[in-house]
Amino acid sequence: MVQKGNFILKMVLVVVKSIVFYSLFTRLKKICMKKGFLMSTIDIPLWTTILGNFGFPIVITIYLFLRFERKLEKLEEVILKLAEVIKRSS
């Protein structure tokens, strides 16, 4: 049951990613056509590479920042509690 759910979730993610990339490339193509630039099929792998090279590090950075922020908040709480305990024992 869990494996089937994971497979379905992975397939949904693949479909969503495909839709996002398709809509992004469609918008980019419309913008290029309005500006007078034509986007060929040769440019699409280039844009995919650029998005992959910049998008992945940005997402990982945001994830790690949020994760470390939570841990730092917990650490701050523990340090404040420790300071209170030390004051009481003195």
Image (cartoon, rainbow, N blue to C red):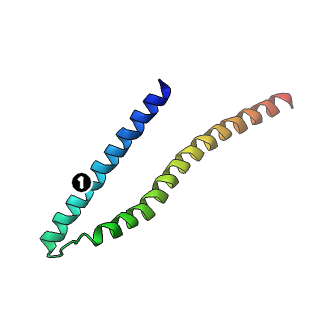
Residue 31 position within the rendered picture, expressed as x and y whole percent measured from the top left = 18, 66
Q: State the residue in front, 63 or 81.
A: 63
Q: Residue at x 64, y 37 (%)?
A: 74
Question: Does residue 66 sit above or below 85 in this rendering?
Answer: below
The residue pinned by badge 1 equals: 23
With 41 as the anchor, is 81 left or right in this view? Answer: right
Q: Residue at x 67, y 40 (%)?
A: 75
Q: Quadrant of residue 69?
A: top right
Residue at x 79%, y 30% (from the top left corner) = 85
Front one among 89 and 82 = 82
Corner quadrant of residue 16: top left
- Split into 4 quadrants, where in the image is the C terminus? top right
- Front-lying residue, 84 or 33: 33
Q: Nearer the viewer, residue 4 or 29?
A: 4
- Which residue ends up furthest to the right in the rendered image? 90
Q: Tag 1: Cα neighbours inside 10 Å, few (<14), some, or many (≥20)?
A: few
- In the image, residue 86 lies at what x, y percent? 82, 33
- Residue type, mark 1 in image: Ser
Q: Position of residue 81 (x, y in %)?
A: 72, 32
Is 51 above or below relative to 63? Answer: below
- Residue at (58%, 41%) from the top-left corner? 70
The local secondary structure at tag 1 comes to helix
